Image (cartoon, rainbow, N blue to C red):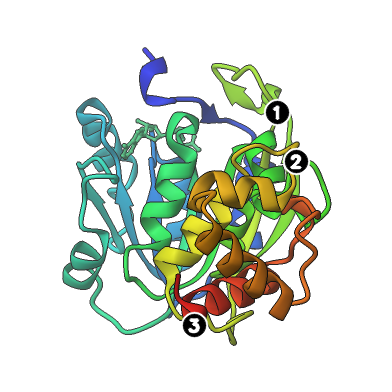
Amino acid sequence: SFKKSLGQNFLTEPNILRNIASTAELNETDRIIEIGPGIGALTEHLARSNGEVLAFEIDQRLIEVLDDTMSPYNNVTVVNEDVLKADVKQIAESVFQTEGSIKVVANLPYYITTPIMMHLLMSGLDVESMVVMMQKEVADRITAVPGTKAYGSLSIAVQYYMDADLAFIVPKTAFVPQPNVDSAIIKLQKRTTPLVDVVDEDFFFKLTRSAFTQRRKTLWNNLISYFGKDEATKEWLETSLNECNIDPKRRGETLSIIEFGELSNRLIANKK
Ligand code: SAM
């Protein structure tokens, strides 16, 4: 029986499983992290790369099944934990025997796609790439470019760290049970050089979220709603925008990550 509450939609198409593994370009020196192995359909493909595999599965009932399906492989460790509560970095350091780059490969539980992505990006692990399946709508938001409807604080939060591309679409018929929406595989690759040197990341992320609070409003109106409408605040915002050559009448969705980064640095430098 499936637990809908845990986002259990199992992939059954061998071709798609193979495609996911090949998109991840795995090799024997890789350290692979999987979230939600389920009954191990994808895990087997990961294990065949001969890299080391660490999988987090929350459902106790599946652990026995996994012990069984994974018994031919000696390079797989399954941890029975809620990945969102787990110290992934510490567990990875204690499980992996070798040094190597970390690649995340997973068919994510959709009810917590964004929290898992953020948990992994903020985990302190040096993740080289992520090949992950999610709802197509979320994949579109993560990979969106400025000036499009899907572009927002989630696109920025992910693309700040990683280069993001849509790899391929997976129809809902490829799953048992079928989810309500189509899915997509995205591939994220760590940026070799940062897009922009941000002085204060917390402030940068607050700024980007505030710029999208009301999408129909101008950047200026979102910023004064967030930072304050008093004269000193307006002066501080106006000067900083001006120094960055950003028209306050633009909408948040037209600003690139570099522009947000530069504005955030200017705002910090000019102090309120
Ligand atoms: N990898 C399998 C596949 O492709 O067929 C199963 C994918 S299914 C979409 C998501 C899996 O994530 C389920 O096995 C579910 O039990 C597990 N899961 C859900 N919430 C989790 C959590 N917080 N931590 C770890 N695993 C979780």
Q: Mark 2 points at which residue?
A: 169
Q: Locate residue 102, reporting x and y percent.
A: 42, 72
Residue 266 vs 82, above or below: the answer is below
- The structure residue drawn at horizontal position 26% and vertical position 59%, both measured from the top left corner, is 88
Q: Distance between the residues labelled 2 and 3?
A: 44 Å
- The structure residue drawn at horizontal position 27% and vertical position 61%, both measured from the top left corner, is 74
The kind of residue tagged 3 is Ala
Disc 2 within 8 angstroms of ligand 1 (CB): no
Question: Circle 2 — which element?
Answer: strand
- In this view, the residue in front, 195 or 74, is 195
Name the quarter where the N terminus is drawn.
top left
Q: Mark 3 points at which residue?
A: 269
- In this view, the residue in front, 15 or 206, is 206
- In this view, the residue in front, 253 or 18, is 253
Horizontal side, residue 96 vs residue 126: left or right: left
- In this view, the residue in front, 131 or 76, is 131
Tell me which numbered mark, 1 or 3, is placed earlier along the sequence.
Answer: 1
Q: Name the residue under label 1.
A: 182
Which mark is on residue 88?
none
Q: Locate residue 93, reporting x and y percent.
A: 21, 72
Question: Circle 1 — which element?
Answer: loop
Question: Circle 3 — which element?
Answer: helix
Q: How far apart are marks 1 and 3 (CA)?
A: 45 Å
Disc 2 packing (10 Å; few <14; some 14–19; many ≥20): some
